[in-house]
Image: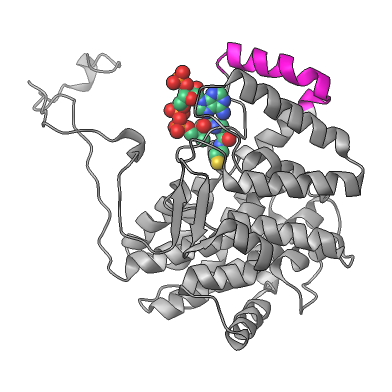
Amino acid sequence: MSTIREPVVIHKGLDNVYVKESKICYIDGEASKLFYRGYSIEELASHSTFEETSYLLIYGWLPTESQLDQFTGKLESYRVIEPRLLDLLRKLPPKSDPMDVLRTAVSALGVYDPQPATDDLDARIDKALAILAKVPTIITAFQRLRTGSDPIPPKGHMTQAGEFLYMLTGHEPDPHDVHVMDVALILHAEHEMNASTFACTVTASTLADMYSVITSGIGTLRGPLHGGANEAALRTVLDVGDPSNADSYVVDALTHKKRIMGFGHRVYKTWDPRYLILKKLGEELAVKKGQTKLFDTALAIETSARKHLEGTPIFPNVDSYSGIVFHMLGIETDLFTPIFVMSRISGWTAHTIEYLEANRLIRPKALYVGKIGLPYPPIESRSGKPQE
Ligand SMILES: CC(C)(COP(=O)(O)OP(=O)(O)OC[C@H]1O[C@@H](n2cnc3c(N)ncnc32)[C@H](O)[C@@H]1OP(=O)(O)O)[C@@H](O)C(=O)NCCC(=O)NCCS
């Protein structure tokens, strides 16, 4: 029997496929520019806070003082996690990957919500904010449990960045560390129609609840080509160990067609503007924390990679220094991607709500290239191999 073939173009990877109009984020990958709702990432990193940026992304405008107070008050009121969820975290194997734990915990939040589903967009935002506020509590509770300590409840009157660092250690965090963390959260909050945002949008387009939407995003962000790259980039720097080893590492990797983690991007064909901000923060932090060798090793990898990749559009991305920054803040490597979630929920929510304002179920097509009309064979005459 013949195969069905249609005269179509397949967009594997969906490069340059537009799925909606959007007013949330603009990236100029050729000019190293990124804007959230029209404001440049440099302006937001210099003047805004993660809470204010989240408001901007989700509602579309920079909040007034009272709008911001209400918003942060809401996040604060949602931050505590209920005992049932803590019990669940206690029962998970301590060796679990924190991203698996986070995915499970966010999904469980939906089970504990007596009314997880709603068609009302404001109610959807409210549920997303509750998840956003609880994620630092979940991550830090699991981190403490797996290292044999008791979880620490939120202190209150602190930002997402401050609460995270406080609940991790139980100590009042250093204000400069909180600032660095806050900027890192701003930089990771949104990035147009990336893989995890698309996954959230697909799930939302079926009118599934926000717990399912955000769980889809977490599952998609987990992979090493997306959110997991910051962990891989730091591991590379730690393995290389010294600036003098950087060039041989890069040459060896490129000779064996291995990717340098923290390099390359589907959209940026030049410097990722977030990388430039994080590199500066990382340099300052390295001096402050006495970890200049780590920073210098990352710098040597970057310099060597740029030399050997000259003439290609492969430049350092946000992940080349984010892992180093988190490491210098004393955060375990496998918590980096969960931190990304702690920030990106804002962008996922903004896109989900924007899409649902004029929803259409997302249902692309696959071009069938197999056979049709095959006679059904009795079990004893099957080859047990793929069809030719
Ligand atoms: C992010 C990424 C998946 C985007 O890739 P993409 O747009 O799909 O580009 P491709 O995977 O098609 O790569 C195109 C070419 O560049 C090369 N390339 C891409 N990223 C590279 C990297 N980090 N190191 C070395 N070579 C790289 C590929 O090997 C490929 O070369 P080829 O054409 O000779 O086979 C890719 O750059 C990557 O894997 N980077 C490392 C992981 C990372 O840092 N991810 C975080 C993104 S924010």
- Where residue 324 appears, as percent x and y from the top left, is 75, 41
Nearer to us in this view, 173 or 21: 21
Q: Quadrant of residue 66?
A: bottom right
Residue located at (65% from left, 83% from top): 73
Q: Can you say whether 368 is above or below 170 in the image?
A: above
Q: Is residue 58 left or right of residue 279?
A: left
Q: Can you say whether 105 is above or below 274 in the image?
A: below
- Where residue 302 appears, as percent x and y from the top left, is 68, 29
**In the rendered image, is residue 223 in sight?**
no
- Residue 45 inside the magenta-drawn segment: no
Residue located at (40% from left, 51% from top): 198
The quadrant the N terminus occupies is top left
- Which range of residues does the magenta coloring cover? 239-257
Q: Quadrant of residue 250?
A: top right
Residue located at (57% from left, 39% from top): 271
> Residue lying farthest right?
290
> Residue lying farthest bottom?
66
> Residue lying farthest front?
31
Nearer to us in this view, 124 or 348: 348
- Where residue 9 appears, as percent x and y from the top left, is 20, 33
Nearer to us in this view, 137 or 385: 137
**In the rendered image, is residue 25 in sight?**
yes
Q: Main secondary structure of the magenta part?
A: helix
The tally of labels here is: 0
The quadrant the C terminus occupies is top left
Residue located at (75% from left, 21% from top): 246
- Residue 246 inside the magenta-drawn segment: yes
Q: Is residue 275 left or right of residue 289?
A: left
